[in-house]
Structures are given as structure tokens and as C-alpha cells.
Image (tube, rainbow, N blue to C red):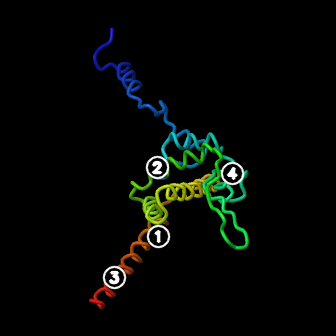
């Protein structure tokens, strides 16, 4: 005999309401225990993406000497060939890395974000195009993740907010100078 609104009935409904790529447990809290920091605080990094990253890279960052080597291992840097001081080619290597792929997928959503990382992604998109912006944003995410896991420090966006404010003020000054030049010409 089960009454309407019984607790077991409620639990069954919650289990059935899971979405396609959703875990049935609190992955964020478990990730925080395993890694020592909350990777989900970063924009566009969800529980599933964080699980994929940790399953691929682990929590020991001593495998890589620096953030640059970590990003290169993730295949998020161009393979620039230089001879005689001239760049012959600069394109991404065709190696498969699931962690790098997860970061590129996460970075593709950054242009919708209103944070500093979103501003960075939009700026890169206007400068180098959509594909380049995704890779550049994923590269920035990888450097932040490397520092977070290695130093066991939570993501603090205060530094980025000051940079964002400074960039906006520089842009306003630049546009005001352009306006003055246009007024003098007219």
C-alpha cells in the first residue's frame, strides 16, 4: 500500500527525471574531495566535463614541468615550424586526446558567458575566427586548471574582474580618441 506523495514515490520520480548525460550522485562534491578544489566554478566546466578531465589527467600534476607542457600534451597549442626565422606552417597536430577534446567542447560555450573568460573568447573570436578562438579559450582554461590542481587553490575571479574593468576602460579611452579625431576631420 502506497499513499500519494510517499517518500519512496518521490525518490522514484527523481531517479526517472535524470537527463541524458547527468549523473545520479553529487559528482561536484566528490570531485572536490578527490582533487582538492572545485573545478566546476570555472565557466563552462560542468560535472561531466570535470569528471572526464580528472579521469584522463589524474590529480598528480608533477608529470608536467609547466603549464605550457600540460597544454601541449592536451594538444591545445599550434605546432609551429620555423626555419631561418620564418614561420613555414602553424597548425594543430592531429593527435587524439580526450581531455583536450573535453576542454575544447567546454570552451566552445564560453562566448555566451558574461565573465572575463567569455570576454576573452569573444575577443579571440573577433580577432582569429571561431576555430582559433575555441582553441585559445581552451588553452586558457587548461592553464587555469593546471594551476588550480597543482597549487590546490580555488578559482578566484577577482583578478580577472580587475583585468576586465581595465580592458573596458582602455577601450573607452581608445574610442574617445577616435571620436576626437573624427570631430577634427569633420
* Res 61 label: 4
Is residue 131 visible to us here? yes
Residue 154 visible to the viewer: no
Q: Are marks 1 and 2 in contact (CB under 8 Å)?
A: no
Real-space Cα distance between discs 1 and 2? 20 Å
Q: CA distance from mark 3 to mark 1?
A: 20 Å
Q: Earlier in the sequence, mark 2 or mark 3?
A: 2
Direction top: furthest residue: 1
Q: Residues within 10 Å of mark 3 (few under 14, many from 20)?
A: few
Comes first in the chain, label 2 or label 4 = 2
Tag 4 near tag 3, CB within 8 Å: no
Instruction: Return the x and y of residue 39 as percentages of the image width and height.
Output: 53, 49
Q: Is residue 35 above or below residue 142?
A: above
Residue on which disc 2 sits: 44
- In contact (CB < 8 Å): disc 4 and disc 1: no
Q: Residue at x 49, y 32 (%)?
A: 25
Mark 1 or 2, closer to the camera:
2
Along the polypeptide, which appears first: circle 4 or circle 3?
A: 4
**Which residue position is annotated with label 3?**
176
Q: Secondary structure at mark 1?
A: helix
User: In what quadrant of the picture does the C terminus appear?
Assistant: bottom left
Distance (Cα) linking label 2 and label 3 = 34 Å
Q: Nearer the viewer, mark 4 or mark 3?
A: 3
Amino acid at each position: 500500500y502506497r499513499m500519494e506523495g510517499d517518500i519512496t514515490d518521490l525518490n522514484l520520480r527523481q531517479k526517472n527525471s535524470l537527463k541524458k548525460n547527468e549523473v545520479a550522485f553529487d559528482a561536484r562534491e566528490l570531485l572536490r574531495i578527490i582533487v582538492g578544489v572545485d573545478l566546476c566554478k570555472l565557466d563552462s566546466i560542468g560535472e561531466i566535463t570535470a569528471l572526464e578531465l580528472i579521469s584522463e589527467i589524474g590529480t598528480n600534476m608533477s608529470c608536467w614541468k609547466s603549464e605550457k607542457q600540460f597544454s601541449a600534451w592536451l594538444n591545445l597549442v599550434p605546432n609551429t615550424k620555423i626555419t631561418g626565422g620564418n614561420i613555414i606552417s602553424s597548425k594543430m597536430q592531429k593527435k587524439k586526446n580526450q581531455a583536450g577534446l573535453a576542454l575544447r567542447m567546454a570552451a566552445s560555450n564560453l562566448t555566451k558567458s558574461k565573465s572575463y573568460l567569455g570576454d576573452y573568447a569573444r575577443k579571440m573570436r573577433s580577432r582569429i575566427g571561431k576555430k582559433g578562438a575555441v582553441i585559445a579559450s581552451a588553452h586558457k582554461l587548461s592553464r587555469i586548471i593546471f594551476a588550480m590542481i597543482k597549487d590546490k587553490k580555488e578559482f578566484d575571479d577577482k583578478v580577472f574582474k580587475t583585468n576586465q574593468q581595465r580592458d573596458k576602460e582602455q577601450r573607452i579611452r581608445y574610442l574617445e580618441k577616435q571620436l576626437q579625431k573624427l570631430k577634427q576631420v569633420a
